[in-house]
Image (spheres, rainbow, N blue to C red):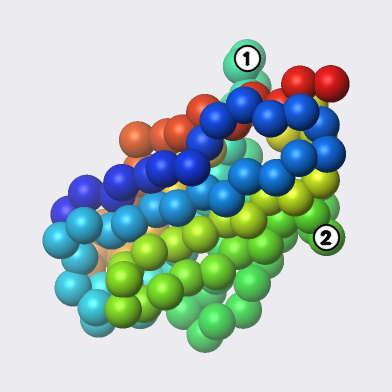
Amino acid sequence: VELVESGGGSVQAGGSLRLSCRASGMILSTFTGAAIGWYRQAPGKQREFVSNITVGGTTNYADSVKGRFTISKNNSRRTLYLQMDSLKPEDTAVYYCHIDARLVARRDYWGQGTQVTVSS
């Protein structure tokens, strides 16, 4: 299984980006049985939670992105998305997708990270 991320880039403040994360090689039952989400790490800072979708379908967001970011997934494509609108310079970070499949596969998975840079 490999998590393949795409969609990062450089934008000006107020702009939008859409990140994608495809779980290549993951069977459907593992994907749907996992909590899936996004984390980010800015230079000199610890990795932090951004958003996730629980197994039951509940979406959660960090306060810093609530109302601006939207998480979604496509089970048939084994793909997770993060729509980021009204971007701010403080959103600049490497974004990582994460699949917590410990309940169904006894492990979790991390993407390789994709850089998002927001200029003022």
Q: Position of residue 84 (x, y in %)?
A: 68, 50
From the image, which quarter does the C terminus lie in?
top right
- Closest to the camera, between mark 1 and mark 2, is 2
Q: Position of residue 30 (x, y in %)?
A: 26, 74
Residue 100 visible at all: no
Mark count:
2
Residue type, mark 1 in image: Gly
Q: Residue at x 76, y 40 (%)?
A: 15
- Of 11 and 114, which appears nearest the observer? 11
Which residue was labeled with disc 2? 67
> In the figure, 9 relative to 59: above or below?
above
- Quick one: SS at disc 1? loop
Q: CA distance from mark 1 to mark 2?
A: 26 Å
Q: Is residue 12 left or right of residue 6?
A: right
Residue occupying the far top of the picture: 44
- Quarter holding residue 40: top right
- Quarter holding residue 9: top right
Which residue was labeled with disc 1? 44
Residue 26 visible at all: yes
Q: Residue at x 72, y 34 (%)?
A: 91
Residue type, mark 2 in image: Gly
Q: Residue at x 52, y 85 (%)?
A: 56
Q: Position of residue 14 (x, y in %)?
A: 83, 39
From the image, which quarter does the N terminus lie in?
bottom left
Sequence-earlier tag: 1 or 2: 1
- Of 90 and 77, which appears nearest the observer? 77
Q: Residue at x 55, y 82 (%)?
A: 57
Q: Is residue 18 left or right of residue 34?
A: right
